Amino acid sequence: MNRLISMDSLRNCLEGVVPSGIATSSPDGTPNVTYISQLMYVDQDHVALSFQFFNKTRENILANPQATVLMMDPDTAARYRITIRYLRTETSGALFERMKAKLAGIASQTGMTGVFRLLGADIYRVLAIEALPGRELPPAEIGPALLPALRRSVDALRECRSLDGLIDTFGSCLERHFALDHQMLLMVDEGGQRLYIVASRGYASSGAGAEIPVGVGVIGVAARERTPIRIIFPAAEYAYGRAIREQIEKGELADELETEIPLPGLAEPSSQLAVPILAGERLMAVLYIESDQQCRFGYDLEDALVALCAQVGFAMCALQSTTGEEGAAPAAPAAVGQGAALRVRHFGRDNSVFLDDEYLIKGVAGAILWKLLREHADSGRSEFSNRELRLDLGLKLPELCDNLDARLILLSRRLADRCEHLRIEKTGRGRFRLALARPVVLEGEG
């Protein structure tokens, strides 16, 4: 292999913007040349080809595993020829799901939606790379320089001392240093089956509290497989909002998905990237970015965000396990504003809370709010601590990874979105205040 050229430097050729051609031969030497739907980067020594149906190329490869691929850089028109050898076919897992999502975008771009159906990802070893002669254009610099952006972001995140601060700083870094205007951060719930939005930027509404099941759309697949999912052409079936709506219409999520909180997001995203945020093997959250421009997110941006999300994942884990509070907060009386009473209804079956008949929140966050309001009604107190919530068996927090801090952040942001009369205000490390601008009337059911 020519060591001056590597697959790492040729990843732009593998985006599917310009179809690649593959040449194979039968055992008797009869050649066959055709275009391929997708050639995908695996690592510096391996690529993957999509297996969609049994054709002459597939027949030849199984009998004679060596092939030659001609590919072109869509920006510079540089051409390269690689020699590859078939190793195996994967029909599930992270690589298969990445290829499936990317193929859906290519199929949509070429008018082949419904025709392309991935049966497997064929893995090949790269044996040789050759640059072919011809006129080339100079490479174009698109977007911010990624290494400086990554370094500045890591420096900023290192200063964070709370989960709330970490979430806000992370979003600011993505917007300021990486020029990512449409983004959202979703935390994984206690059962590991759903993701809920805790922060977003670039949308008319934050969508705080909106849920996405693991395995649904580009975000859910990235969470399930613990792998980045990147699509650079419109792919309707991977637009998470549409994917969820379609499953609701089919009745598949009717009893599982809370639909009162609308999902933010672009109506028709042309580029999507979901990156799981991990702390070791533990899934903490998923970062999702999108754009209305095709080919907006490349391999290099994906690499940079994977590295940044690794830092965020361990920081989340550390901050959630370090609360720093001592004892319970004093039972200070709450200052309550004047005006008509705010009616708060609670349903015990799922801890859903409604304010004047409008849905607010459910689950652990709903149970926390109901506890705070009941404590206020009974004693007039307004000061609380994380520690006392963790010791409250009625909240039914899991013994491991209770994610309490994230739920408090969600509750605070959801209240800020939907109700100007109730607030959760941080007063210190592991301490917060319930602020009421109107009297409340509590109605508990179930």
Image (cartoon, rainbow, N blue to C red):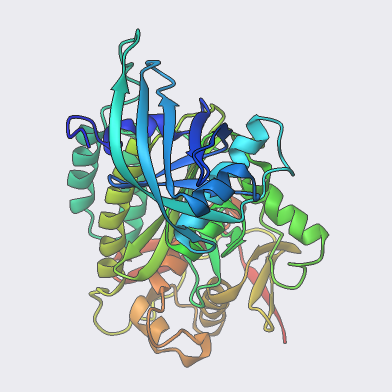
Q: Is residue 206 visible?
A: no
Image spot of residue 203 (x, y percent): 56, 38
Against 39, residue 329 (above or below) is below
* Image height of 49 relative to 121, above or below: above
User: Looking at the picture, how far across and down is residue 215, in whole percent?
Assistant: 58, 63
**Which residue appears at 17% of the width and 30% of the height?**
4
Residue beneath the point at 23% across and 74% down: 324
Task: Check the picture and name the quadrant holding the N terminus.
Answer: top left
170 on left or right of 19: left
Residue 168 shown left or right of residue 195 in the figure: left
Could you tell me which residue is drawn at 25 percent across and 55 percent down?
311
On the image, the x and y values in percent for residue 246 come to 76, 54
Which quadrant would residue 390 be assigned to in this image? bottom left
From this view, report whether residue 429 is shown above or below residue 443.
above
Q: Which corner quadrant of the image does residue 402 belong to?
A: bottom left
Q: Nearer the viewer, residue 45 or 266?
A: 45
Q: In the rendered view of the protein, which quadrant contains the C terminus?
A: bottom right
